[in-house]
Image (cartoon, coloured by chain):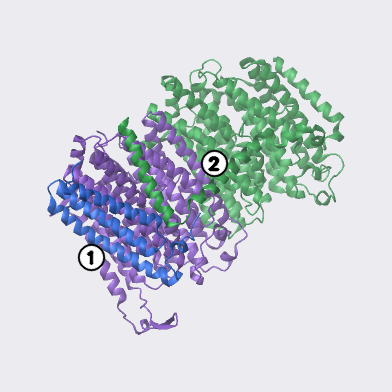
Amino acid sequence: MTSSVLVALTIGLPWLGALCISFGVRDRSERAQHALAILFAVTSGLAALALLPTAANATILRIPVGGVFGDFTFNPDGLGVFLASVATVVGSLAVIFSVDYMRGEKQLGRYYALVLLFIGAMAGLALTGSILLLFIFWEITALCSYALISFYNDDPKAVAGGIKALIMTQIGGVGLLVGALIVYAYLGGYDISLLIEKANTLPPGVLNVLAFGFLIAAAAKSAQFPFQTWLPDAMEAPTPVSALIHAATMVNAGVYLLARFYPAFAPVPGWTMAVMIVGMLSALLTAIMALVATDLKRVLAYSTVSQLGYMVYAVGAGSILASQFHLLSHAVFKALLFLGAGAVIHAIGTRDLRKMGGLGRQMPLIRTTFIIGALALVGIPILNGFWSKEMVLEAGLSGGPAWIWIVMLIGAGLTALYTFRVVWMVFFGAPRGDDNHGATHAHDATHAMRFALVVLAVGALTTWLLIGPFSGLIASSFGAVAAGQPHELSLTEMIAEVVTAPATGIALIVIALAIGAAWWRRDKLTALGNRLGWLSRMATDSFGFEWINRTIVRGTQAIAGGLRVTQTGALNWNILGIVGGLIVVLAILAMGVAR
Amino acid sequence: MNNAFLWLIALPLLASPFVYILGRIPFSRAAFRTVRLDGHLVLENPRSRIPAFLALAVMLIMWVFFAMTASQFLANGAQSWTFGSVSLRLDGLSLLLAAVALGLGTLVVIFSGPYMADDAGEEKYYALLVLMVGVMIGLGCAYDLFNLWVWFEAMAVSSYLLVAFYHEQPAALESGVKYLVQSAAGSVLVLLGIALVFAQTGTLALDQIQSAARATVNAPALLAAGALFLIGYGVKAALVPLHTWLPDAHSQAPSGISAMLSGVVIEAGLVALLRSLGSLSAVTPSWSTLLFIFGALNMLLGNLLALRQTQVKRMLAFSSLSHIGYMLLGLGIAVYSGQPGGAEGSFFHLINHALMKGLAFLAAGALLYCLFIATGSHNALLISDLAGAARRYPLPALALSIAVLGLGGLPPLAGFMSKWQIFVAGFQTHDLVVMGLVIFAALNSVLSLGYYAPLVNMMYRQKPSTAVQSGKPLPWIMGIPLVLLSLAIVAIGIWPTLVQWLSAPAGAALVSMTAFGR
Amino acid sequence: MTWTPLTLVLIGVICLLGVGFYGLLISRNLIKIIVALQILGKAALIAFVMAGNVNGQTGQGQALAMTIIVADTIVAVVGLALAVQVRRRFGTMDIKALSNLKG
């Protein structure tokens, strides 16, 4: 009973807040908007955290809607509550950060309403037990993401980035839609548990479509290969939104989807391999792109895709625990990096790495927290990123082919390289840029920003200590423990496992070599893009995928424009349409008779 | 009172002349004004608010009859009434059409109060609007082929006049002429079809035709009649390639009429098509193929043609084509499988489309009114004119956003739910081709976001267009229908079975009436 | 094929349809288009009389034909009213002038 109230609060409070802000306060009082947004986001976060102890794999709220809509169910098991907590807690921090970042912006009400709507939808996505409802929340998050990317919608780049994200995630969403339709049409209900139990009763061809449909949906949502192009363009959003939606929560929904349905799809031939390859390609390609990008937020976006690739890879290799643990670490340290980047951008007013440099002295707190996040991203002991990444690599070595594992190791090395490059270009070296106008006026973070940054930095240092209860949560979501499925893992066990694993040593050597190389040639890092030549050119074009996107969009628009000729406006032609239609229909009917 | 539905039909037909005549009577001295037109001194039409209030009163009384009709129907099932050779029968489908026509009609009357206040000839407008609503309800209840055609023709004539209502504007006149000629050509085809059926079976009653058709499978005369019905009524239902009148008429009519045309009139054409084709359902299994072909064409062409439009109302008009496509898909699924699911989904989508497209046209109309009509201009509303509209006109902008996002099929709005029901029915056939069509439809929904989303985006820009800056404030009366429709769309989106009492009997009626199930 | 009255009527109907649609497809004068619509309408009403004759319900066929005459006339009246307005606003009856709405 209490947990159903908590579920309702977790999802409902942010939505109530969104209503209050958009219809109650409007744009009359900025202070009230900030205060209400924080109030509703934080209370929702507390409700989600309160769900943690009681998380159990059982449906606690069932709303019978009837018809073909089945029951709207909520099933707050460990996996779901975990993701809901990440969404609401990081959401709260992003909202707190926004108080400073968005101060004085126009249409603040719309901003907060959408952010809160997103937080509620994301929590709903995690907590629901119905595939239809999952799809509905999935689409709401996509809509919020679109609206927030295009928030500065007088800027054509923001508008283009938003529509690109919307269309690409929607095309992927068709995969999830097809899956949900198949589940209902063949199994007669929308319950996730129903699918997991009865997946083996589906005809094999249908199950294949289902499994790969979900993979397409997950890849599009998590910006995985071949949909990786939307996330960098989504960086036109206000930075707290990038931290929340495009780093810590929504993009994780794809990984969550794969993990959630792993037990149902693992037996599908080729599925796990496809998942691993998608993860590998995403991790490797975007790491190269991050290496040559010159926009601070785009580097972080590429890095997000790359790290999501690791999580997808872990699912494919059969370790849901590793993937979700990396998801947790990544949510914390990437939110930290984005908010740090946001603070930098807010202070100096540009996102171009080439115009930064030497900012560390003016903004020591931002520098320190950003470096903590960067070290976690690289995977330096003892930060949370180290433990989770080592667990991913270890799972990959045991559960997947060696060649993919080697590629992932190279990816880890590249991660170290580009992370070092970013830190160096932003905070160290000589101030760059034409007039260096920004850097001289740079200032350190203000109160609300400081709070969010420090909390997240502490998180990046400590979340790995939670492995015991965390693994319990994940394990409890998967019922009977089959081979390769998550089991409880205490802290000491994890430390022992990671430290003794051969993967760890090799990975650390690769990372150390990469950092060493970067340190050795640190003066050349700024112009790295020029030195890499053709590789750099390919990387900035997303290895041809930007071209494919452009071609599809232009082709569709050209066809649409061309078709307008058919609307001649001449009455005689219109009549010809009627006569022609009649003849064609008669012909089809005649063919039907002949057959 | 038995047969409340007769009153539901009779009241508007009887009241319509009174709306006109009372509107013509000059009750005040101020009504006798002369104006100079084309160099001649002419007596201006009296301007009075009487027709508007009278029309609203008629609509409200009709709601009473509607409530009685609905409760009788839900308690006792279908009702019929025969007078000589004319028989009317109210079943689920009729009730659905009545509800949609009356609901949208009432809101349009409210909306038109301020919208039409400055136009001459208000009394004609309201009289025709009331007449059109009544005739559409009658169309839903017609139970023989010829009777159906008569109602259909009456609806068509009243809508010709309403489309060409701004007859002093060349564009409105042009669209009226095209609409009339194309519809009349279609209506002749329908007549030929009826003649063929009459010659072959010797009867016009739908149920008798149906039993006769079952005895004569593949009779060439009946096949040809079916093709003629499909094309003839298809002109009004805007099947591609018979749709060419639609974008012109929808964009040039007064906005309230655009809402009616798109929300009810083309659907009434679809209902007439279903009734006629349904009686011939046993003749050939090809009907479902044809519905699928037209459905796919409508979805694809409607969306592609809408993609590059620059006028708001014209874009919405093209999007109507694609929504007819979804309905055809659902109906095709029902015909193909013999299960009511697809038809229920289609009729659910019909209701939702009436709400969403009605709201879209009314909200666009409200903006058009504030930006242009109130300032005395008759420009077309361009998408770029809407830049920054949300700051000055938060309600119409929000309403238009809800409407188009619902049309684009984003949950939790009504449009998603009805599309979902159609899609589920498609997958329940377990047939590869049908499932492929459903995926095609889903991809089309994504494509449609390519023009809906930028429209929403445009309204929430910060830099207002010059039209927005010089716009007039929104009359509060216009806000009422916008609020009601927006709430309905959100409510149905959150609780999709809210209107199942309407859509389910309609789906069942279609399947039983036409014996699609065989 | 024997030349019964029925075949003659049938041929007549088909000819009228042909003339009507030809007019709609070719003619550019609005009045001619409305005339073509009328010809089509007449084809339909003859078809009804014929249909009544075929199935032995001549009376009903003729009654329906009368109704069609009424309905057809109303459409013609509305069409001509629009034609008058077209002439007034455009100064021409050529429907080429009526093709500004396109695309």
Chain seen in purple = B
Observer-nearest of A168 and B399:
A168
Task: Determine the chain carrying the residue at label 1.
Answer: B
Figure quadrant of residue B113: bottom left
Q: Is residue B15 left or right of residue B376?
A: left
Observer-nearest of B249 and A258:
B249
Q: Position of residue B145 (x, y in %)?
A: 22, 49
Figure quadrant of residue B428: top left
B364 relative to B414, above or below: below
How far is mark 1 from mark 2, CA to CA? Answer: 52 Å
Residue at point 52%, 36% (across, down): A173
Do the numbered discs 1 and 2 sit on residues whose CB atoms are within 8 Å? no
Q: Position of residue A340 (x, y in %)?
A: 72, 41
Observer-nearest of A240 and A495:
A240
Q: Is residue A195 left or right of residue C40?
A: right
- Chain C's colour is blue
Q: Is residue B117 left or right of residue A390?
A: left
Q: Position of residue A105 (x, y in %)?
A: 65, 55
Marker disc for residue A141: 2
B465 relative to A323, above or below: below
Q: Secondary structure at mark 1?
A: helix
Marker disc for residue B14: 1
Task: Determine the chain carrying the residue at label 2.
Answer: A
Figure quadrant of residue A154: bottom right
B78 relative to A590, above or below: below
Q: Is residue A2 visible?
A: no
Q: Is residue A583 left or right of residue B401?
A: left
- Chain A's colour is green
Q: Secondary structure at mark 2?
A: helix
Q: Comparing marks 1 and 2, which lies closer to the viewer? A: 1
